[in-house]
Each structure stands twice: as C-alpha cells, then as structure tokens.
Amino acid sequence: MSGTPENERDDEALAAAWGADLEGGEGEGGEGAAGPDAARVLNQAEIDSLLGFDSGPASAVELSGIQKIISSGLVTYERLPMLEIVFDRLVRIMSTSLRNFTSDNVEVSIDNIVSLRFGDYLNSIPLPAMLAVFKAEEWDNYGLMMVDSAMIYSIVDVLLGGRRGTAQMRIEGRPYTTIERTLVERMIHVVLADLSQAFDPLCPVNFRFERLETNPRFAVVSRLSNAAVLTKLRVEMEDRGGRLELLLPYATLEPVREMLLQQFMGEKFGRDSIWETHLAEELWETDVELSAVIDEQWAKLADVMSWRVGSRIVLNATADTPVSLRCGGVPLFQGRMGRRNGRVAVRIERDVPRRQGET
C-alpha cells in the first residue's frame, strides 16, 4: 500500500513535464498555437466531398424505374466497331479527293466518334455554320453534315486564290453569300461521294445531297430523343482549315446494323473465303434422303380410325402417272417409275419450280 502514492506522484510529474514541453513548443512556434488539428491531413472521403464526388453507399443504390427513365440520357449506346473502320477509310479517301479539289496540301483526321441524342447535338452546334441534309437512298433515311465557320472561310479563301499566311477572316452577323454557299456545296458533294465510296465494301449506298441550311431548326432529320453517331473530322490546309461533323442516326444505319456489329474485317469485311470453300466441298459430299411419292390422298380421321387389317386403299395412280421426288417434304423433281437391273427406279424428267420461301 505504501508504494501507491509514490507511483501517483511519478505519473503526475511526468504529465506535468509533458504539459510544459507542449506549452513551450506552442509558444516558440507562433502558428502552432492553433492546436494539433491545424496540420491535420484530409482523408479521401473529405476530399471527395469537397470536390462534389459521392463515393458513399448511396451511389451503389439501384435506381428505380422512373429514375432510370430520367437519367436515360447517360445510357451508353450500342457500339459499332465496323463503323470506325468505315470512317478510317473515309479519312484516307477524303485526304486525296480534297487535295484534288483544292489543289492544296490537305490533311484529314478524326477527332472522335461518339454516340449522343440528336436533340443534344442540335443544341451544341457552334453557330454560324452550314448544315447539309443528305439522304441515303438505299437505306431510305437521312443524315446531317455540319461545316463550321472556319472551314467555310478556308474553303472560300483557297478556292478563290487567297494567299497563304493571311489571318482568317470571320464575318459574323450576316448571312452567307451565294458564292460562299455554292463553293461549300461543291465541297459537300465531294465529301458525300467519298462517304459512299467508304461504305462500298460493306454495302453499296448512295448519299444524295438534299439541301443546305444555316438554322439548326430547319435541319431536323430525326426525333430529338433518338440516338445518333457523331463523327468529328478535322481538315487542315497548312495554315488554314476547320471542322466537319457527320451525324448518322441509328435509324439510318439500321439496314446495315448486323454488318456494323462485326468485330474485325477480313478480306471482304469479315468473310472467310477458306471456310466458305471448305463448307461448300463438304456440302457436296452430304447424303440426303429422297422420297418417291406415287400418290397422295386426304382422308377423314373417322375413316382412318375405322381401318382394320385387310382394308384396302385405292390409289389414283397408273403405270404412267408421274412420280414426285421429295426431300424433307419439299418437291424437287418429277419422273417416271420403272425398273433397272432388277430394282425399282425413277427416271427424272423435269424440275419442280420452288415456291417463294422454300429452300
């Protein structure tokens, strides 16, 4: 019992020494008087909260049906890998055709390919600009091409013999002149011809120019809520250039959707000629069963149920009646029945024309 007061005095002395050291450090440091919380480092949750990110458990809560409909603008649309290859081909073709069109050194590149809603794109078009509406004749639907202001003045400048190195002229607040519209329309015809050529290995299609608009409200080719694929192209002519944007609604691409979903491109956009040849050779060696039908009759179920052993069925066929050869129920040939080498045989006399839908 006598050692307890001594231990308590030692603890009190140690605590007093620590308190004195702490007070001395705060007095010397000046800024240390704010306490130990002044130098505290924020954790990740606090940083996310300050920056507006919500990484808490609420973000993992499954959305209800109404919430999914409201946030449907963030849905990722179906990816079309083969469409990227088509636009890569378009870039190479356009680089050559625009060089011939402008007699200048032209470089075309793809900025990005994105999927978005048609209404969102119309609201994001930088004005002033020219909007070309074109029709895919074989697909019976429309697309949109946007030529920005810098590209318009660059084309006008280069086609009318403007000198290189001059500053780009931007005239705002006035409608485009007839000369400007005519020159840009000629360039649009060149680009649409190149786009048709880019799609040729996949599906022959002709993109026909319809009209040129400067107001996005008059260039609506799809419902505002429909999905579309937007391809942004950058055209550079040394110190001049601008941007072209091609918008193809998913409804326009629907006729070739299955082809655009291919993951790779072979010799003919995914076709394997070696496998096709092997399959054809194996099909020629396949055995099929043919049925020789002499006659057919329809009977009531009550009559069939009354048949017994010894019942006779009279066939409406004679020795000269043609015999029908069928495979899997499909009529193929007609012929005459006879004998050959002691076996029943059928001599084929004519083909049976196949009805639409039969294979």
Image (cartoon, rainbow, N blue to C red):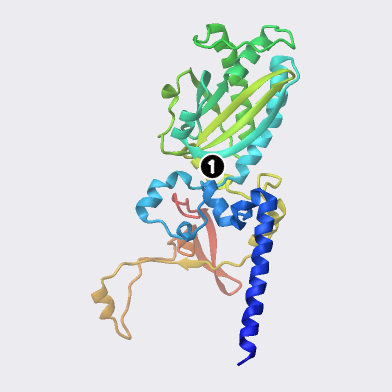
Residue at image position (50%, 39%) is: 116
Q: Say which of 88 and 244 sits in front.
A: 244
In the displayed image of the protein, which residue is found farthest to the left?
Answer: 302
Above or below, comparing residue 86 to residue 132 in the picture: below
Residue 266 or 236: which is nearer the viewer? 236
Q: How many marks?
A: 1
- The structure residue drawn at horizontal position 55% and vertical position 70%, both measured from the top left corner, is 339
Indicate the quadrant where residue 179 lies: top right
Relative side of 286 to 211, left or right: right
Q: Is residue 347 above or below residue 223?
A: below
Visible residue check, residue 337? yes
Q: Is residue 175 above or below residue 285?
A: above
Q: Position of residue 170 (x, y in %)?
A: 59, 12
Look at 49% across and 42% down and name the residue there: 254
Is residue 285 something that shows in the picture?
A: no
Vertically, is 220 above or below 330?
A: above
**Tag 1: residue type?**
Val
Dot 1 crowding, Cα within 10 Å, few <14, some 14–19, many 20+: few
The residue under the point 73% across, 22% down is 106
The image position of residue 41, as x and y in percent, is: 63, 55
Residue 309 appears in which quarter of the rendering? bottom left
Q: Secondary structure at mark 1?
A: helix
- Measured from the top left, where is residue 202 in percent x and y? 61, 40
| Image quarter in which the N terminus is found | bottom right
Which quadrant holds residue 146? Answer: top right
User: Where's residue 306, x and y in %?
Assistant: 25, 81
Residue at the spot of label 1: 256
